[in-house]
Amino acid sequence: MHFHDCFIQGCDASVLIDSSQKNKAEKDSPANLSLRGYEVIDEAKEELEKQCPGVVSCADIIAMAARDAVFFAGGPVYEIPKGRKDGKRSRIEDTRNLPSPTLNSSQLISMLRQRGFTVQEMVALSDRSSLSTKQALPNPAALSPSICVAANEVGKPPN
């Protein structure tokens, strides 16, 4: 979820926004239909709002959940800056910029290089994004700390 959110227009939780009668949102894109865990983010937000209303954004919750998932899968522990702002806009047409699962390795390398990722980071991201469909966990050592830096660009869309 974190990758899908951040890849579109920065880490702004726009992937959580529901569609309306006037606007079809990212959440309903075929590229995002496999995402799971919306209810976990909603529950965390609800509990945080009871304790500290208006302080923790959904964008920060997604980032912290991704960090914790990496840790619980045997990956590294890393700090993330807090203070992301939640986006107000979510459009299904923006998801056309997500990497398609049908891209070959050359196409994927080219697309992610445009976003500032190395080949090694691309391999780590590709491996991590398939965590939920694998029997065995991937090697967490493949996750470079620079991925964490890229994922933590607060509200900043990629170049």
Image (tube, rainbow, N blue to C red):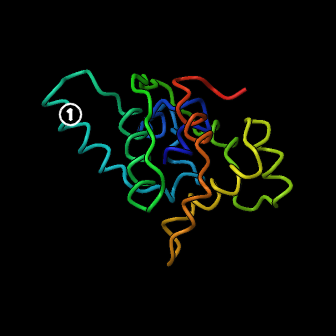
Tag 1: residue type?
A: Leu
| Residue drawn at (42%, 22%) of the image | 85
Q: Nearer the viewer, residue 43 or 63?
A: 63
| Residue drawn at (73%, 36%) of the image | 115
Q: Secondary structure at mark 1?
A: helix
Q: Nearer the viewer, residue 50 or 123?
A: 123
Q: Is residue 54 shown above or below 151?
A: above
Q: Nearer the viewer, residue 16 or 1?
A: 1
Q: Is residue 55 shown above or below 150?
A: above
Indicate the quadrant where residue 21 lies: top left
Residue at image mark 1: 48
| Residue drawn at (75%, 62%) of the image | 102
| Residue drawn at (67%, 29%) of the image | 158
Q: Residue lying farthest left?
A: 50
Binning the other alpha carbons within 10 Å of mark 1 as few (below 14), some (14 to 19) or many (20 upward) gives: some
11 vs 20, left or right, is: right
Residue 77, position in %: x, y? 43, 47
Residue 133, position in %: x, y? 52, 71
Q: Is residue 135 shown above or below 17?
A: below
